Amino acid sequence: MTCPLACGGPAARDAKIVAPAPSPAGAAPADSPHHVAATASRRFVVVPERSRVLILAGSVLGEHPVQVAEYQGDADVVEPTLHHSRVRVTLKLDSVEATSPTLTKLIKSERVLDVQRYPTASFASERIVPQGASQQSYRLIGTLTLHGISKTVEVVGRVCREGTAFVASSRFSLRRQEFGIKPGGLLGLLINDNVVVDLRLVAEPTSAP
């Protein structure tokens, strides 16, 4: 499965806050020996030099791109359907870089991300479900932790092969207030509640098949 151009630029969708799904009766937990034996996986690690994590924050003054410079991620990939695969990504929020030093300082401050108290944001998938008839579009359901708050969310993304690597891309929006980010005063009125996360992650295998 190779990556078309569309794999790098899906349309933005809202990330849904969803209730955790109960495990079917009699089903083995995802981390149990029975589950692992039934779904042998291969580990892939995100290559930051070939990847991108961008946050687009809107305001009355326009759209402000904020790059996350440092992050790490890995995946336990089960082919061919990816249904039993697991993905984990951690962002180092002190590494965010906006279009100006002043804006970067503001975003890192206690008025927005408060990186001193909450230095990272993370996502860990629990389920990966094919989306429609496409063989590259998937719904990822998992736990997103941001600003000290963890919620089960659902995002839509594309996953495809590019040589030996897997490439995952997604563009989705989050409501900052759902994660307790509520800048007060004039700043709260100027910044849009919705922020867009635009990412493209390239992951290479840690060993040969």
Image (cartoon, grey):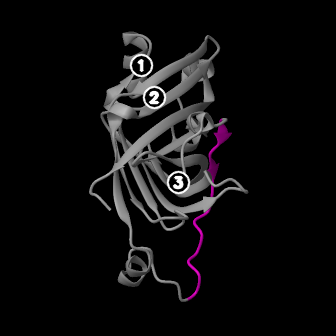
Q: Main secondary structure of the magenta part?
A: loop
Q: How many marks?
A: 3
Q: What is the distance, in whole Å, between disc 3 and disc 1 at their CAs?
A: 25 Å
| Coordinates of residue 171 in the picture (x, y in percent) | 59, 37
Q: Residue at x 58, y 43 (%)?
A: 178
Tell me the quarter of the picture where residue 130 sits. bottom right
Which amino acid type is marked by label 2? Val
Q: CA distance from mark 1 to mark 2?
A: 7 Å
In-front residue for pair 39/27 = 39
| Res. 118 in view | no
**First in sequence: mark 1 or mark 2?**
1
187 relative to 41, above or below: above
Label drawn at residue 151 = 3
Name the amino acid type tagged 1: Leu
Position above or below: 62 against 52? above
State the SS at label 3.
strand
Quarter of the picture containing the C terminus is bottom left
Is residue 166 visible in the rendered image? The answer is: yes
Question: Which of the 4 quarters of the picture holds residue 152?
Answer: bottom right
- Which residue is labeled 1 in the image? 106
**Chain part drawn in magenta:** 12-25
Eye-nearest disc, 3 or 2: 3
Whether residue 104 is situated above or below residue 40 in the rendered picture:
above
